[in-house]
Structure formats: C-alpha cells, structure tokens
Amino acid sequence: MLGGVTVPWDKGLAGHSDADVLLHALIDAVLGALAVGDIGQWFPDTDDSYRGISSVLLVRQVLADPRLKPWRLGNIDATILAERPRLAPHIPAMRAGIAALFGVEDDRVSVKATTVEGTDAIGAGDAIAAHVVVLLMHRS
C-alpha cells in the first residue's frame, strides 16, 4: 500500500501496520501542524490492536480528533522518494483517495514521486520515504 493504493511490486514495505509510508508521513504532518505528537505516540507499535491495520483507518482516526475541528485543509504537498516501483501511473488514485479522506477536491492534494539517483538505501531499492507538508487554515 502506498497513499492508500495497492501498488504492485515484487517487494513489500515492512511495518507494524500496513506500512503505507505516504499516509504515515501525512499523519505526522497533520499531527505536527497541530503540535499534538506524532504517529508513534498515537499508534505505538507496542499496541497489537494496530498490527496490520490500514493506514487509511489511522488517517480517519486522526481527522476525527476534536482538536482538528477549528481547522480546514488548505492543501497537501507530498513527495515520495523511491527508486522503484514506477509510481506515476498510481499518483492520480493516491491524490483522489487522500482528497476523499479530507473531503476536498483533488486539486488541493499534490503527490509527486522522485528517485534519489541510486544513492543510499532508497536508491538501492531497499527503502521508500515520503515528505509531506500540510497547510491547515483556521475556520474563523
């Protein structure tokens, strides 16, 4: 899973939940914007109730938190760093799925993919990373 989308690949991502690195970075960006902790504090890997859970459900849980009520989404800018698999064909579905989670139009969600030109574990195809910036705007 990547960005809530099944991406066919001969390797998988390792993690306590479904290991969706993009949605995990998105969760951390929202929690960071609110200054209310991080994904590890909210969904610790020591809690078996989160083992194998869909990251979509984790995003929904964060978005349901009452501390988010006074805020609305301005936009999301996400970058996935991966040498493989090729992600361009999957980006429209990722954008649409993330936009649906937030209840906004797709044009508020940017998802990009880039490589690291063969450097480090990402470049060797042994890892994937994601960076996400979220703009939250006060409803008042």
Image (cartoon, rainbow, N blue to C red):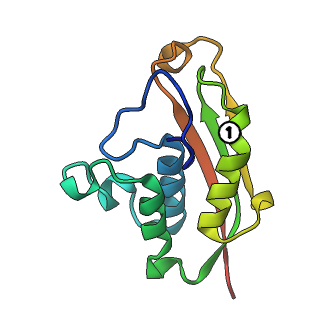
Out of 5 and 82, give the one closest to the viewer: 5
Residue 46 vertical placement versus 80 (above, below): below
Quadrant of the rendered image containing residue 105: bottom right
Q: Position of residue 140 (x, y in %)?
A: 69, 88
Give the residue pinned by disc 1: 90
Residue 8 falls in image quadrant = top right
Residue located 38% across and 55% down the image: 39
How far from the left and from the top, in percent, is residue 12?
A: 43, 29
As displayed, is residue 51 above or below residue 116?
Answer: below
Image position of 120 (left or right of 16) = right
Label 1 Cα crowd, 10 Å radius (few <14 / some 14-19 / many 20+) = some
Q: Where's residue 125, x and y in %? A: 51, 17
**Residue 48 left/right relative to 14:** left
Q: Nearer the viewer, residue 138 or 80?
A: 80
Q: Secondary structure at mark 1?
A: helix
Q: Is residue 45 left or right of residue 84?
A: left
User: Residue 110, image x and y in percent?
Assistant: 73, 49
The residue shown at (61%, 36%) is: 80
| Residue at 65% in and 65% down | 100
- Residue 18 versus residue 115: which sits nearer the camera? 18
**Depicted 78 relative to depicted 63: above or below:** above
Farthest residue in the bottom direction?
140
